[in-house]
Amino acid sequence: MLGFDVVDLGPADHPEPGDSAPAFTRPLVTDEFWEDRSLAALVEEHDGPTVLVFTPMTGSFLAKYVWDELTARDWDERVGQVVGLTASTPYEVTRFLEDNDYPFRFFADPGNEVAESYGIAHDLDGMTGISEPRIAFFAIDAARTVESAWVATDWPEFPDYDHLETDLGLK
């Protein structure tokens, strides 16, 4: 069994409910193609909230655990839309989607600038200049207003999904 230490990530300076979600444009990736897309254009596509889910790099056990859980809970059918955001390249995201058959789209942000703008980036231990996002969930309305937010304070930490679903108004 692999062992690991729980790491306190310290406080995050992330958008809270009522705040405007930081704008960005990044490649939006599916298992078939990718194209640059703005968050503003994305949230205008659907009624209901857009849930932006930040996970560490694709291929990590943390990312796989989160996306397996959301798939098992049918979030693709219960929320306006769920979109991932990861510090991986479009090629890595495409491979992740092909290998796991997830029904979600992902923003690729290999430089981790979006997580920086959301105040949820953390440096990877022992890797100078390498960071990734904390696990985080932001429900955003069509005006890019944050309706709900959950951000990890430890590595690894996962939300109480039942509580998170209640916060998001999922049935």
Image (tube, grey):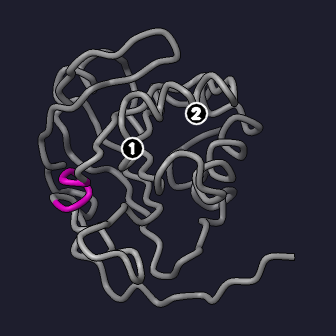
Which residue reaches farthest top? 32
Q: Which residue is mark 2?
A: 96
Q: CA distance from mark 2 to mark 1?
A: 10 Å
Look at the image and tell me in which quarter the N terminus lies: bottom right
- Based on the displayed image, in which of its 4 quarters is residue 169 positioned? top right
Q: Tell me the amino acid under the disc marked 2.
A: Phe
Q: Position of residue 67 (x, y in %)?
A: 63, 43
Q: Specify start and end residues of the magenta stretch as a single range.
A: 112-116
- In the image, residue 130 above or below residue 2: above
Q: What is the total number of numbered labels drawn onto the structure image?
A: 2
- Between 71 and 65, the one nearer to me in the picture: 65
Q: Is 120 above or below relative to 114?
A: below
**Residue at left offset 16%, top offset 34%:** 143
Left or right: residue 46 versus residue 101 is: left
Q: Residue furthest right?
A: 1
Residue kind at label 1, given as amino acid type: Ser
- Location of residue 5 (image quadrant): bottom right
Q: Are marks 2 and 1 in contact (CB under 8 Å)?
A: yes
The residue under label 1 is: 88
- Kindly state the secondary structure of the residue where label 2 is placed: helix
Seen in the picture, residue 16 relative to 89 is either above or below; the reply is below
Horizontal arrangement in the rendering, residue 169 relative to residue 19 (left or right): right
Give the residue at x 19% y 20%. 41
Density class for disc 2 (Cα within 10 Å; few <14, some 14-19, many ≥20) is: many
- Residue under the image location 68 percent in, 28 percent down: 99
Q: Is residue 26 magenta?
A: no
Earlier sequence position, callout 2 versus callout 1: 1
Q: Is residue 127 above or below residue 136?
A: below
Secondary structure at badge 1 equals: loop
Query: Residue 145's x, y, as percent?
Result: 20, 45
Q: Main secondary structure of the magenta part?
A: helix
In the figure, is residue 152 to the left or right of 22?
right
